[in-house]
Amino acid sequence: PMSTDYPGGDFGVELEVRLLTKSNFFNRELENKNFKGKTVQEAIESVFPNRNIINMDKEDRLKIIDKNFYAPTPKEFIEKIKKGKYVDNVITDVGYHNLEIECNFIFTNYKQVGENIYYEALEDYGLEFIPQQESDIDPEFKIRRIYWNAQIFFTHKLRVGDKVSFRDGLGKVVKNTILETSARLSNTGDCSLTLKLYDASNFAPMPA
C-alpha cells in the first residue's frame, strides 16, 4: 500500500488486491469428464455445484453441448466452455456472508434479445460523463465489437453481466452488458465505479 499524509491529518491509501485461489481446486479431478449431450446448465452445475450464477437466457441455458467436450478438471472445463462459444465470460464473485467467505462462479452470455429485458439507466447511478467508445474487429466472425468505458458513483448494486443503458450525445439510448468493473475508493474524496460495457449492437454482423 502507498499512503500520503495531508496537513489536516487525513491520509489516502491505495491498495491493489488480487485474489488467489488454491490451485488444487481448479486442478482437481472431476468425476464426470465428458459433457457432450448435456445442457449447458447441467454441465455448469455438475462442475460447480451450489457455486454457480448463470446470467444467460433460457435458450442458452438449455442448449445441448453437441461437440466433443472432454474436461478432466474445472480449469479445462472453463477454457473449453468458452472456446466452444457456449459461454462468453466466466468470473468469480467473492463476498463475506455469515462470517464465512463465499465464492461463486458467474457464467455470462452477452446476448441481448427479447422483449422483457430490463436495462438499468446509468444516469440513475450518477453517470459522470458520456461513456467513451472503443472497438476491435474479429476477422474470423466478421464482427466489429464495440465497447464503452463509463464512470459512475460507487455502488454495490451493479455487477458483471448486468444489463445497463445510457444516452449518447444525440440522446439515443445505448444498451449494454457490463463486462468489467473496477472501483476507486477514497476517504478524502468521491468514490467511483468504472465500467467496461459490451454494446448490444455487437451481435449484428459486419456488412460484406
Image (spheres, rainbow, N blue to C red):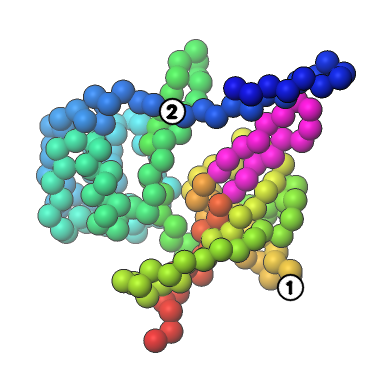
Q: Which mark is residue 19?
A: 2
Q: Distance from label 1 to label 2 (Cα)?
A: 41 Å
Where does the image place residue 9, in percent across and percent down from the top left?
83, 15
Residue extending farthest to the right is 8
Where does the image place residue 102, in percent across and percent down from the top left?
43, 23
Where does the image place residue 161, in percent across and percent down from the top left?
49, 48
Q: Is residue 164 magenta?
A: no
Magenta residues span 181-195
Q: Residue at x 19, y 35 (%)?
A: 73
Q: Residues within 10 Å of mark 2 (few under 14, many from 20)?
A: few
Rendered view: 59 above or below 204: above
- Specify the amino acid type for callout 2: Leu
Residue extending farthest to the top is 99
Question: Counting residues from the N terminus, which is met first, the one under dot 1 or under dot 2?
Answer: 2
In terms of secondary structure, where does tag 2 sit?
Answer: loop
Left or right of 189? Residue 173 is left
